[in-house]
Image (tube, grey):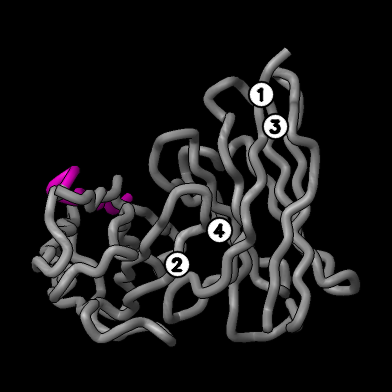
Amino acid sequence: EIVLTQSPGTLSLSPGERATLSCRASQSVSSSYLAWYQQKPGQAPRLLIYGASSRATGIPDRFSGSGSGTDFTLTISRLEPEDFAVYYCQQYGSSRETFGQGTKVEIK
Amino acid sequence: QLQLQESGPGLVKPSETLSLTCTVSGGSISSSSYYWGWIRQPPGKGLEWIGSIYYSGSTYYNPSLKSRVTISVDTSKNQFSLKLSSVTAADTAVYYCARSTPFGVDYWGQGTLVTVSS
């Protein structure tokens, strides 16, 4: 099973700042099958990024994904008030999907 | 617009079987492009993939739950279902049904809280 480790656990930032979230895999992940999700309290997760770097439909361009192999990054270029949430990475497509434990982006 | 809706008991007794159904509307569950899956989230914790099913009936399960999980599909009703046996308090969670694609999990149900308690 591929274990995904996200860091940091919590990121305290102000609106307008840049957020950089990390997702590290215990073994190589195909870039085609690495996704990022945003989850707000009481809501289902929302797909942000798939294939490591492609934005899902309707996702603003301030969200970007990068990385390959075992190291992946989600960047939010300028935090908007609605971006404060928990973010999860996921590897899929291998019939053994796994999620990272999440990074909470909170208002400083 | 595709919609997924979970249904089933919100309270299950320890050692019994948790049963949930996901009804898909606005699209066909028989599409060859998608898997249909279950994901859960214990209160205050992260997401855990439970398993997925293809419309043909092929299934993939989380190894840690495999001995207790059965996912099935009913294409005539556009539904798929989850059964989790021998539940304990550790199985208390919000259970989501979702559509998996080669481009991630793009549609989710609203989630349903299942509490395991006597």
Report the amino acid beneath label 2.
Arg
C-alpha gap between disc 2 and disc 4: 23 Å
Please state which of the two labelled residues, at mark 1 or mark 4, is closer to the viewer.
1
Q: Position of residue B26 (x, y in %)?
A: 75, 82
Q: Earlier in the sequence, mark 3 or mark 1?
A: 3
* Numbered disc 2: secondary structure: strand
Residue at the disc numbered 2? A46
- The numbered disc on residue B116 is 1
C-alpha gap between disc 3 and disc 4: 17 Å
Q: Earlier in the sequence, mark 3 or mark 4?
A: 4
For residue A84: magenta?
no
Please state which of the two labelled residues, at mark 2 or mark 4, is closer to the viewer.
2
Q: Position of residue A58 (x, y in %)?
A: 42, 86
User: Is the residue at mark 3 from the same chain as the one at mark 4?
Assistant: yes
Q: Which residues are magenta?
A: A1-10
Who is closer to the viewer here, A104 or B99?
A104
Estimate how packed mark 2 is, as few (under 14), some (14 to 19) or many (20 or more) residues with alpha carbons within 10 Å: some
Picture quadrant of residue B45: top left
Q: Earlier in the sequence, mark 1 or mark 4?
A: 4
Report the amino acid beneath label 1.
Val
Is residue B116 rendered to the left or right of residue B61? Answer: right
Residue at the disc numbered 4? B60
Q: Quadrant of the N terminus of chain B?
A: bottom right
| Pointers 3 and 1 in contact (C-beta within 8 Å) | no
